[in-house]
Amino acid sequence: MFKNECPGSQDIKSPRPEEIKCRSCGAEVEIWTDETEAKCKACGTVTNRLLGASCLDWCAFAKECVGEDKYRRIQAGRSSKN
């Protein structure tokens, strides 16, 4: 069966909430799968998600696939962590 979507971009194109621990206070922080950072409601610290390699790193069609705005936001969030 032919699929019209790349499975690697699913979490970006159809984001869902996840929880990560705040690195400052240990509280649970809600972050969406298309976000690179979120603010902790308990202490106010901005917590960053550690992102591994994804299709955005190598696919020639990544900008068109996920949309240029999301592509730029995610790549900018990644580069600010380096």
Image (cartoon, grey):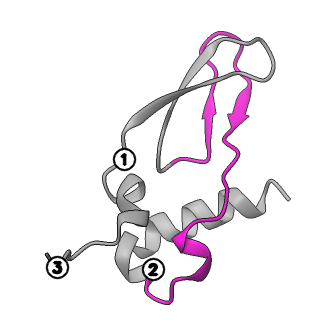
How far apart in space, not on screen, are marks 3 and 2 (Cα)? 21 Å
Expressed as whole percent of the image width and height from the top left, the position of residue 10 reads: 35, 58
Q: In front of the other: label 3 or label 1? A: 3
Q: Amino acid at mark 3?
A: Phe
Secondary structure beneath label 2: helix
Residue in the image at 44% along x and 75% along y: 68
How far apart in space, not on screen, are marks 1 and 2 (Cα)? 16 Å
Q: Earlier in the sequence, mark 3 or mark 2?
A: 3
Q: Please give left or right for residue 23 compared with residue 67 in the image.
A: right
Mark identifier at residue 15? 1
Name the residue at the right extreme. Answer: 82
Q: Which residues are magenta?
A: 35-61
| Residue 36 drawn in magenta | yes
Q: In front of the other: label 3 or label 2? A: 3
Q: Amino acid at mark 1?
A: Pro
Name the residue at the front extreme. Answer: 1
User: Which of the 4 quarters of the picture holds residue 61?
Assistant: bottom left
Q: Which residue is mark 3?
A: 2
Residue in the image at 65% along x and 64% along y: 53
At label 3, counting other C-alpha atoms closer than 10 Å, the crowd grade (few under 14, some 14-19, many 20 or more) is: few
Name the residue at the left extreme. Answer: 1
Q: Please give left or right for residue 40 compared with residue 4 in the image.
A: right
Expressed as whole percent of the image width and height from the top left, the position of residue 70 reads: 46, 64
Residue in the image at 46% along x and 79% along y: 62
Q: Amino acid at mark 2?
A: Lys
Q: Which residue is mark 2?
A: 63
| Residue 60 drawn in magenta | yes
Secondary structure beneath label 3: loop
Q: Earlier in the sequence, mark 1 or mark 2?
A: 1
Expressed as whole percent of the image width and height from the top left, the position of residue 47 reads: 70, 32
